[in-house]
């Protein structure tokens, strides 16, 4: 690979990363994922650890008449922000749950469904909403959803507050966003690619369709590499294979982002935030191109500089969600492999 060309590519995506970190990310960071489950009663309400931190819960009411409960503690005067939304598939089914917000000194509003439990001494606010005609586009995922209800107020009293999600007629997928401070732990950040898969499943997609773009890139990419190597009669060492596979996984991540963007835009309007999604697609694609060029250059001895490049690529990919965790690991492993192994892989002749 031409050194000058590689440095140009490296400079391009480092510049993109810098712009993303400085300008874009503070404005579009999504909610940290939070798991629930087993919260079908007030006594087993799922705990929201810090209601000021931005959390996202993706769950499902399995049948009509079922309610899910959540709880959190907060001090008087602190801001409470809660939003309820549903998936596109659930909207098509007519699923429209209500949000019941309960706690001390809340202004009573609406009629509390008979099946919803209310804590002793608490008042309740019932918020019903109708799905809008157009879905909201989320550039960070990318995905789409339909907003139903939002509560935004200062806590009238210190204490424990409860949220109930209830639908009288049928089950469906709903999402609950709580909090406003966009912050992530290192683990939450790194695991975002895995959580995004579950979000797309929540939208109504199956796992095979979500992973299909990645699979196509892997199959086509490996076939093209084998054909090129066979035609030129070039051997493929383990270093070549692992590095190339990491690059293809990075490319597959970028193509997956683009495919999910297209799916989301079938429900939502074309908005300026699409540009944010394009940045998140471009970064893994640039990482993939760089990794492939490094891996497929034929050399008798792998220089330390090239190994360092693979470490850098792996770390960048890990923090920019390229390669579904496997790609970054392969890139770092590639940096440790010897120039030649005991077995040299060659493409089979016709």
Image (cartoon, rainbow, N blue to C red):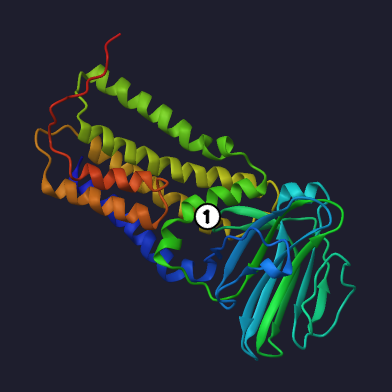
Question: For the point 34% across and 61% down, which residue is it?
Answer: 15
- Nearer the observer, 120 or 300: 120
Q: Is residue 290 visible?
A: no
Residue most toward the top? 350
**Residue 147: horizontal and vertical position, in percent?**
73, 62
Horizontal side of residue 181 vs 350, given as left or right: right
Question: For the point 52% across and 53% down, which residue is it?
Answer: 195
- Nearer the observer, 43 or 227: 43
Q: Quadrant of the C terminus?
A: top left
**Quadrant position of residue 187:** bottom left
Residue on which disc 1 sits: 277
Horizontal side of residue 312 vs 144, given as left or right: left
- Nearer the observer, 213 or 337: 337
Q: Is residue 36 visible?
A: yes
> Which element type, helix, strand or loop, lies under badge 1?
helix
**Residue 94: horizontal and vertical position, in percent?**
83, 51
């Amino acid at each position: 690979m031409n050194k000058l060309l590689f440095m140009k590519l490296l400079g391009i995506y480092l510049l993109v990363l810098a712009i993303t970190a400085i300008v874009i990310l503070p404005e579009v960071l999504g909610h940290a994922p939070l798991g629930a489950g087993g919260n079908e009663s007030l006594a087993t309400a799922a705990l929201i650890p810090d209601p000021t931190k931005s959390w996202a819960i993706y769950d499902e009411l399995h049948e009509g008449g079922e309610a899910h409960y959540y709880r959190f503690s907060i001090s008087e005067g602190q801001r409470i922000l809660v939003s309820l939304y549903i998936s596109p598939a659930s909207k098509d089914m007519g699923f429209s749950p209500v949000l019941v917000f309960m706690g001390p000194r809340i202004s009573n509003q609406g009629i509390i469904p008979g099946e919803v439990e209310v804590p002793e001494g608490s008042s309740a606010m019932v918020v019903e909403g109708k799905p809008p005609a157009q879905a909201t586009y989320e550039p960070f995922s990318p995905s789409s959803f339909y907003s139903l209800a939002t509560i935004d107020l200062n806590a009238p009293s210190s204490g424990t507050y409860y949220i109930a999600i209830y639908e009288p007629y049928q089950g469906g997928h709903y999402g609950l966003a709580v909090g406003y401070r966009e912050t992530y732990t290192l683990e939450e950040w790194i695991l975002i690619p895995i959580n995004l898969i579950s979000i797309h499943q929540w939208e109504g997609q199956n796992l095979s369709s979500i992973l299909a773009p990645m699979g196509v890139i892997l199959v086509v990419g490996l076939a093209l590499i084998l054909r090129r190597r066979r035609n030129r009669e070039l051997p493929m060492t383990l270093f070549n294979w692992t590095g190339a596979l990491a690059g293809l996984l990075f490319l597959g991540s970028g193509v997956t982002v683009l495919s999910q963007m297209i799916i989301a835009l079938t429900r939502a309007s074309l908005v300026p935030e699409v540009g944010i999604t394009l940045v998140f697609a471009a970064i893994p694609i640039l990482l993939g191109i760089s990794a492939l060029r490094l891996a497929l250059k034929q050399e008798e001895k792998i220089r330390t500089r090239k190994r360092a490049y693979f470490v850098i690529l792996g770390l960048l990919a890990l923090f920019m969600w390229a390669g579904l965790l496997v790609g970054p690991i392969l890139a770092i492993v590639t940096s440790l492999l010897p120039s030649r192994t005991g077995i040299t892989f060659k493409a089979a002749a016709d």
